[in-house]
């Protein structure tokens, strides 16, 4: 049996281009066409998602769902879980949400792909995307990677 050492992370042109590339995963149907996105994400993320929705014949109003609205609907049930893990939240400097929502894979168990924009995480925190079972991610290097304007971006796509 042959084994392959696959490259898991790679450099790409720009972060927004990387995000557009990963939208190749978006295959909307009549019953599964929604994209969950945080309402305060980077404006460029919103533009990329909105354009992909329109390219696929969908409307932003029908197909883009605000993550925080979903979170508000389940916040009561999450409260006890949060209290239990509160000490770990501080220890991991905010990585709790990232690890929880990806590793537990709630959305993946529903048949959704889970992707991350890691522009502010790149260089600031250790990223174990494969180990966390992230489906895909992208990040820029111009800010925290100190490459300046025009710096390369990175992308991650899980081999499964």
Image: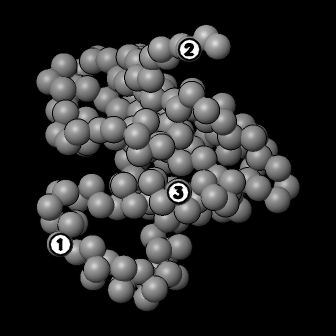
Residue pointed to by mark 3 = 105
User: Which callout, 3 or 2, points at the residue further toward the start of the chain?
Assistant: 2
Residue nearer the viewer, 73 or 1? 1
User: Which callout, 2 or 1, points at the residue further toward the start of the chain?
Assistant: 2
Q: Residue at x 55, y 62 (%)?
A: 106
**Residue 9 x/y as whole percent:** 41, 23
Callout 3 secondary element: loop
- The quadrant the C terminus occupies is top right
Residue pointed to by mark 2 = 3
Q: Residue at x 73, y 53 (%)?
A: 33
Residue pointed to by mark 1 = 87
Neighbour class for label 2 at 10 Å: few (<14), some, many (≥20)? few
User: Which callout, 1 or 3, points at the residue further toward the start of the chain?
Assistant: 1
Nearer to us: label 3 or label 2: 2
**Residue 41 x/y as whole percent:** 39, 52
- Residue furthest to the right: 30
Q: Residue at x 21, y 66 (%)?
A: 88
- Residue furthest to the front: 1
Query: In screen coordinates, is 106 left or right of 137?
Result: right
Q: CA distance from mark 2 to mark 1?
A: 40 Å
Is residue 67 in sight in this rendering? Answer: yes
Res 140 quadrant in image: top left
Neighbour class for label 3 at 10 Å: few (<14), some, many (≥20)? some
Callout 2 secondary element: loop
Q: CA distance from mark 3 to mark 2?
A: 26 Å
Q: Is residue 118 above or below residue 33?
A: above
Q: Is residue 7 above or below residue 144?
A: above
Neighbour class for label 1 at 10 Å: few (<14), some, many (≥20)? few
Res 20 quadrant in image: top right
Q: CA distance from mark 1 to mark 3?
A: 22 Å
């Amino acid at each position: 049996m042959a084994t392959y050492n696959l490259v898991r992370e790679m450099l790409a042109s720009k972060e927004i281009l990387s995000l557009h590339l990963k939208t190749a995963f978006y295959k909307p149907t009549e019953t599964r066409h929604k994209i969950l996105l945080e309402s305060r994400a980077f404006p460029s993320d919103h533009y990329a998602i909105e354009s992909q929705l329109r390219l696929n014949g969908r409307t932003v109003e029908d197909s883009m769902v605000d993550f925080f609205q979903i979170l508000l609907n389940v916040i009561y049930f999450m409260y006890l879980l949060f209290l239990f893990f509160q000490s770990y939240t501080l220890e991991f400097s905010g990585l709790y949400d990232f690890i929880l929502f990806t590793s537990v894979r709630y959305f993946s168990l529903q048949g959704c792909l889970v992707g991350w924009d890691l522009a502010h995480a790149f260089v600031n925190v250790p990223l174990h995307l494969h180990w966390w079972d992230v489906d895909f991610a992208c990040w820029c290097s111009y800010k925290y990677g100190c490459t300046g304007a025009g710096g390369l971006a990175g992308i991650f796509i899980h081999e499964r």
